[in-house]
Image: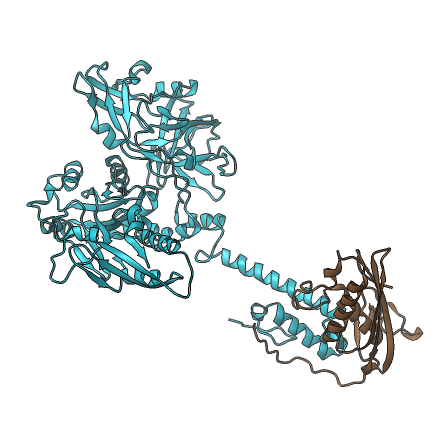
Amino acid sequence: MSISTFTEFNLPRDAYTAFDAVSMKQLITNRLKASGLFPDIDFEGSNISGLVDIIAYMYHVNLFYLNQTASESMFSQAELYENINKMVTLVGYKPQGYQTCLLGFDFTVTSPIPTGFYTLKRFSYMQLNGLPYSFNDDVTFEKTLSGDQLITSVSDNHTLQQGLMKEYPLYTAVGESFEQLTLTITQTTQTNTPTYIDHNNIYVFVFDVNTNKWSEWKETSTLYGTKSTDKVFEKRFNESGRYDLKFGNNITGHKLNTGDVVAVYYLQSDGGRGVVANNALNGKNIVMLNTTQWNRIFNDIANPDLNYMSIDQVKYIKLNNQFASTQFTVPESVQEIRNNTPLLFSTQNRTVTVEDFTSVLRKNFSNILADVSVVNNSDYTAQYLKYFYDVGLERPNDDLQVLMNQVMFTDACDFNNVYVFAVPKYGAIQNDITPTALPVSQKQLIINKLNQTKIINQNIVVCDPVYQAFGFGLSLAGEEAAVFIKDETILRVYRSTQYNTPKDAIKSKVANLIQSFFTTSNNNLGGIVNLTQLNIDILSIPGVAKIETVRSGTGNRVVPKINMIMWNPFYEEAAPLVTSQNISMKYFEFPFLYQSSNLINKIEVV
Amino acid sequence: MAKITIQGLPQATNYQLPYTYSDLHLDIQQQYLINDALHQQPEINDIKVDYDIDAVKNSVKNIFSTSPGNKILNPEFGIDLRRFLFQPATISVGYDIQRLIYTDIEKFEPRIKLIDVGVVVDEENNEFTVTMIFSIPSLNIKTISIAGVLNGNGYNFA
């Protein structure tokens, strides 16, 4: 590495990197002692010693910053968000910004509305105790019954977005190639009314000076690959946490004309405050966005063939949400960008391999998905469908979720299916005992996204995992395993005589540990339920001397470790697995702790 | 810590210096390196240096005015007189100061041999006058004294 040396000291050219403050002080001391001019350098109290300390320490600090600056210029070591965000522009990666809460809903049109086709205008919203939820697209439906009618096609294909559509000040285009508009809205969490722009809801409308008409410009993942006439823009969450909107040059993407007026609508989210519980939509009225600018734009972009609902008609729409909203999601972190960038780059904006699908889903749906696994048709039939035969069904479609996913998302031809098993990020387990599936509307979001990058003949099917319940369970000798043993089995924890930790405190720590072990975020589809590690972790709790799984009731048996039962709560008659060994789940299986809130009553400390 | 071996470093010149100890004079000032009429030319001026007894005095003063933690590369260095900052000027505290100086001064300044430490308490002005008498055997100096006042402004040498 070093090709030359310092002429005077015969040091390698890169020797400076080897010094720290102490070794630098030593070097200076040696040099001064060698010169003989300052023999006092050896005495810590001398002025010269203090001066040398300062010089050596300054050198150390400067070298630290030099090192840090050098590290920050490398993708693998950068720690500052601004740096990594800027770096990944080189490979066209677009970091994810804030993602607002999403809400599935039931859409009922009541009897005063006669049969026919209707369209609810986009950006309509409702207020849920001060929290707005908005439609981000036009909702077209057909009412076929004269009475009240639940329109499932709407609830299956649309999702409410937390927040209100805001108008960004109008921008007059300069007319240059690749014109860029940066939304100078500071997103902050520091005030009482935080401002967040939802990453997935930025809409652009342009008033063309030549035609005197507004038109909608669509977002594209990259301008390269679009035609010169395509009215598209590219969006990027930049290093300052603001959005850059980039338009074309009449070669790749249409160019803005000089004097064109750009109107940007963005969804302003309430962040974490926007989460709502189930049934929050009951009785709330839909309000249509009604601003002068929006009405003018909508007059130009409205489809003349559609029958848009009036303000009077909208009040006859009733909404309800069976499930709570998803959570608010913060922007990708430095580490997430570092992990996702090479994966996304390798997909080349195409989803072909399992890794491609997984990468795209993890990046784009981190707000709604806890985990995904992707398989082809042969793996699906060989393991997933076989599982339902194994649990005793005559055919897999006897399972309601399997049937529904088949009906909703598949066609007559199955060999080209790509099956996506998705675990919802929040509320995977309702009421401690019932696993819940991803709402259809969110499955549709996934399909819509993958349809942009998939191979033309692929068919995406979003499936629900098989949730396997876990609880303490111990079989008697010769007994056939059955689910009821979970009710007769407890975990007994022996308190160490060397500790005087209260028993309740130990019980609470053990319960928290087991609950955390089975938390959705700590598990994976096809992962390993590592009961060995769980044993070790419990025994590592201060005050725990030993543990036993104890069966009582119809018989008595004790084993000196955690013994668990795993079963499918929908098919309790199917043979459960009772074991103290690690359990390897299949790609479609996901573990959860049955009656998690009651766990503390299943633990005894003696 | 990196171990640096420096080859080609010039060896100490083996000649007799006209002094035993030398230290930088603070604040840094210029002076003639060889201070006689013959050599007083602008080309040979250099920073001012304290020799022998003045160099040792520098060291003792620095020990008194440094609190542990102040010297980054030797955080244990210094006499912790700051601990007496908010204490009343009493004979009892005076003894504590005296004991502290006895304990620490020779540890940080091995060139001196402490003979006596006198602490006079001025209760009215809430300050202590500290007089330290020591010898410097390597310079063959039998007794030398340094006096200073410790008060709310720190330790100030007379």
Q: Looking at the image, can residue A27 be seen?
A: yes
Relative to A385, say whether A548 is above or below: below
Q: Residue at x 18, y 48 (%)?
A: A568
> In what quadrant of the picture does the C terminus of chain A appear?
bottom left
Q: Is residue A164 left or right of residue B17?
A: left
Q: Residue at x 48, y 28 (%)?
A: A171
At which x and y percent is residue A388? 12, 48
Question: Which quadrant would residue A10 be assigned to in this image?
Answer: bottom right
Which residue, as the protein is rendered here, is positioned at the far left?
Answer: A394
At which x and y percent is residue A481? 14, 56
Q: Residue at x 35, y 18 (%)?
A: A299
At which x and y percent is residue A308? 28, 18
Relative to A191, say whether A505 is above or below: below
Which residue is more in the foreground, A388 or A255? A388
User: Which color scheme does this rendered protein use?
Assistant: by chain
Relative to B101, say whether A237 is above or below: above
Q: How many marks?
A: 0
Which shade of the palette goes to chain B?
brown
Q: Residue at x 75, y 75 (%)?
A: B106
Which shade of the palette goes to chain A?
cyan
At which x and y percent is residue B80? 72, 64
Which residue is more in the foreground, A27 or A110? A110
Question: Which quadrant would residue A237 be assigned to in this image?
Answer: top left
Which residue is more in the foreground, B11 or A118? A118
Q: Looking at the image, can residue A247 be seen?
A: no
Question: Which quadrant would residue A3 be assigned to in this image?
Answer: bottom right
